[in-house]
Amino acid sequence: MKKYDAIVIGDANIDLVVAGCNELPKPGQEVLVQNMTIHVGGGAALFSLALAKLGLKIAFNGILGEDGFGHFVRDHLNQYGIDTSYIRSSSSNTGISIAINPEKDRSFITYMGSNAELSMGLLDLESVALARHVHLTGYRGRENHAEYMKVVRSIKALGVTTSIDVGWDDTGEWFSGIFELMSEVNVFFMNEVEAEHYTGCSGIMDIIAKLSAYSSHFIVKLGSTGAVATVNGQSQFRSGFQVPVVDTTGAGDSFNAGYIYGFLSGQKPEQCLLYGNACGALSVTQSGGSTGTPDRTAMEHFLFEKANCTTDIWESA
């Protein structure tokens, strides 16, 4: 028995969600909006909350300011039983991301704050031995590729499995070293647009063919359409669930958590996809990146209710 089911390293910040903002104010103007709400944000924090809600034991590695927002994030993580003892303090303020119109085409104003100090050096390798799995975020291509490779190989040497969601490449380089990283990680997540940029391919089958040369287990998320998992060269697709959309913030992180929950439970890829799609769907039904993410009972109830719904499934070798 390990102390933790998973250790997560990455970003945690405040999300200020602004609903009903149809125009940005011009100089000297004021715009009234429908609502503003504060939530915990950051892909790693949202993934951690989603996994903790599903009943797994989680430890979080990150860096937060010693301000009110930093304490808000810590308290929220603690509320769900997440071990925050590995979070380091920063003299910078905690990061804030303002999400405008999350129910439509989201726009963001972001202050990185303490997240700008994130590095793989924050991961306590002694703590890794206490876990079954490590989930990594914060990959920045050429800037920290060597650091990531070193840490992933160190984790692998301890017999601990890994997963990573690389996210969007703000530099626009789409560094080809990602394929080297893929070969070392046990479960690799990308969305379709990211996969198109990295591979230079435009069709999902061509994307899968190229990524299969480097990874034995990867998932391409297709948004509300569903997701494809490829394991040892065999691909399986499951379509997503149709639900009323309130806020898509964190949907991909919730999907990742559902999938990894299945993976750590020893489920087959098709079941992992089902869990991922369910968690991703439920997360968008409420405002905030973690508000709608289900606990295990809610996820199972949702899947039971949807059992008679038609979901597209295909496999290819």
Image: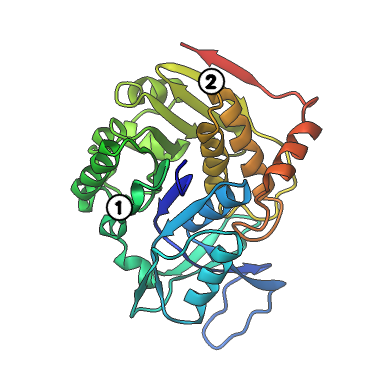
Q: How far across and how far down the image is residue 91, in percent?
A: 33, 80
Is residue 169 shown to the viewer in this render?
A: no
Q: Residue furthest top?
A: 317
Residue at 67% of width from left, 60% of height from top? 287
Q: Residue furthest bottom?
A: 28
Q: Amino acid at mark 1?
A: Glu
210 displayed left or right of 75: left
Residue annotated with mark 2: 236
**Which of the two residues, 133 or 25, is positioned nearer the viewer here?**
133
Of 62 and 100, the residue lying toward us: 62
x 66%, y 56%: residue: 103
Disc 1 is placed on an element classified as helix
Of 86 and 188, which appears nearest the observer?
Answer: 86
CA gap between label 1 and label 2 equals: 36 Å
Q: Specify whether 204 is left or right of 313.
A: left
Residue 55 location (% of width, % of height): 61, 47
